[in-house]
Amino acid sequence: MRISKEKAADNRTALIRAASKLFRERGIDGVGVAEISKEAGLTHGALYAHFRSKEELALEALSYGLDEANSRMYSSTMDGMPDLARFLDHYLALETRDDYGSRCAMAASASEIGRQDKAISARFAEGYMVMVRAFERQIAQNDPGGDALGRAMVVVATLIGSLAVARGAAKGNPAVSEQVLAAARRHVDELMCARPAAADERPAA
């Protein structure tokens, strides 16, 4: 029995959403296609009607997660720029730390992306740079003439790494987990706003 184009599109979207959630919760290598199909309310065969391989689905699922993050970043703007202070409040919150399935796809998958294929790695890098460019614009505005790109790259890497570490420590040492998030916010704020002192302005050792 043939299904309509609209139903086929809905099924494809359901598979991508299910994969994105499960991959963030358990990792790309920790989830099978049967589990993804079940989560989407579809059969195993339905998945392969839309995707030639698990890798192809993983690419689409990662893209979906990155697009979600981008939408959250731009959900609130100030003077045409994303409200990054608000974004940081949410990103480095305990609720985000504990919610694997619908939060940052990069923090959830950073440690395993290097083991995936080139297309997935390229999409990860692309998503990383989308975040970097948003922070770069803000840093350049706060500190004209500074190394806005370099500092923005460190900011985003700090966010991803700090969330991953906070998650890793949360069950065994909640205090350390919370300290990581708090310290990350302080240092990100410094990178966003503080102008590094010139060599002749730094206090003598």
Image (cartoon, rainbow, N blue to C red):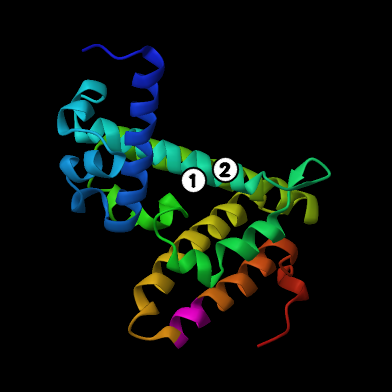
Q: Residue at x 20, y 49 (%)?
A: 31
Q: Residue furthest right?
A: 79
Residue placed most toward the observer, 123 or 9:
9
Quadrant including the N terminus: top left
Q: Quadrant of residue 5?
A: top left
Task: Tell me where the magenta segment starts and ends, as one range.
Answer: 175-180
Q: Which residue is mark 1?
A: 128
Q: x%, y% of residue 29?
A: 19, 50
Vertical arrangement, residue 187 with respect to residue 136, above or below: below
Q: What residue is shown with label 2?
A: 70
What secondary structure is found at the residue carrying circle 2? helix
Q: Residues within 10 Å of mark 2 (few under 14, many from 20)?
A: some
Residue 196's image quarter? bottom right
- Amino acid under label 2? Asn
Whether residue 75 appears in this view of the structure is yes
**Percent coordinates x, y for residue 57 in the rendering:** 28, 33
Kind of residue at badge 1: Tyr
- Residue at x 44%, y 43% (from the top left corner): 65
